[in-house]
Amino acid sequence: MIAPTEASRVSTRFEWPLEGLFRDLRVRYGIKMALAGMLGLFWALVLRLEHPNWAVLTVVVMMNSQHVGAISIKVFMRVVGTIIRDRHPARFEFRIFPKQRE
């Protein structure tokens, strides 16, 4: 009896031409970020926000996390910063150009 060799095996599984491309995590991450950005922009336009382009920037900032808990930490810090800024606006007021005397 003849033993089958590597050359005699026939692949019965169809390989999609771009399958190797989508195995790369950077490509999948880029696709996810693009879809999330478009979805954020869509909802910003539907809700008629004043500056809908900020929704895309928010997606980029939030998706740029290195570990699982990073998003929740960023959300918490943003909420705390917003509350502090609203409670004490004069302390955190930075001016690029000082007020000019008349």
Image (cartoon, rainbow, N blue to C red):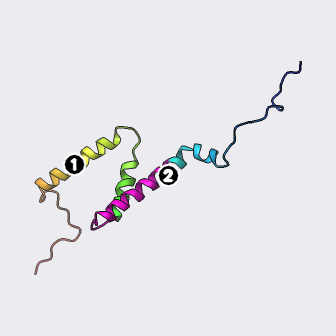
Q: Is residue 38 magenta?
A: yes
- Res 58 quadrant in image: bottom left
Q: Position of residue 101 (x, y in %)?
A: 11, 78
- Residue 79 is tagged as 1
Q: Residue at x 50, y 52 (%)?
A: 31
Nearest to N terminus: mark 2 or mark 1 = 2
Could you tell me which quadrant the N terminus lies in? top right
Q: Is residue 17 above or below residue 51?
A: above
Question: Element type at marker 2?
Answer: helix
Could you tell whether 23 is left or right of 29 in the image?
A: right
Q: Position of residue 6 (x, y in %)?
A: 80, 29
Query: On the image, numbered disc 2 is attached to which residue?
Result: 30
Q: Type of residue at label 2? A: Gly
> Which one is in front, 23 or 68?
23
Could you tell whether 54 is left or right of 9 in the image?
A: left
> Which one is in front, 61 or 35?
35
Q: Residue at x 35, y 64 (%)?
A: 53
Question: Element type at marker 1?
Answer: helix
Q: Position of residue 67 (x, y in %)?
A: 40, 38
State the extent of the magenta-drawn residues as a range. Answer: 29-52
Q: Residue at x 10, y 81 (%)?
A: 102
Q: Position of residue 20 (x, y in %)?
A: 63, 44
Could you tell whether 56 is left or right of 12 in the image?
A: left
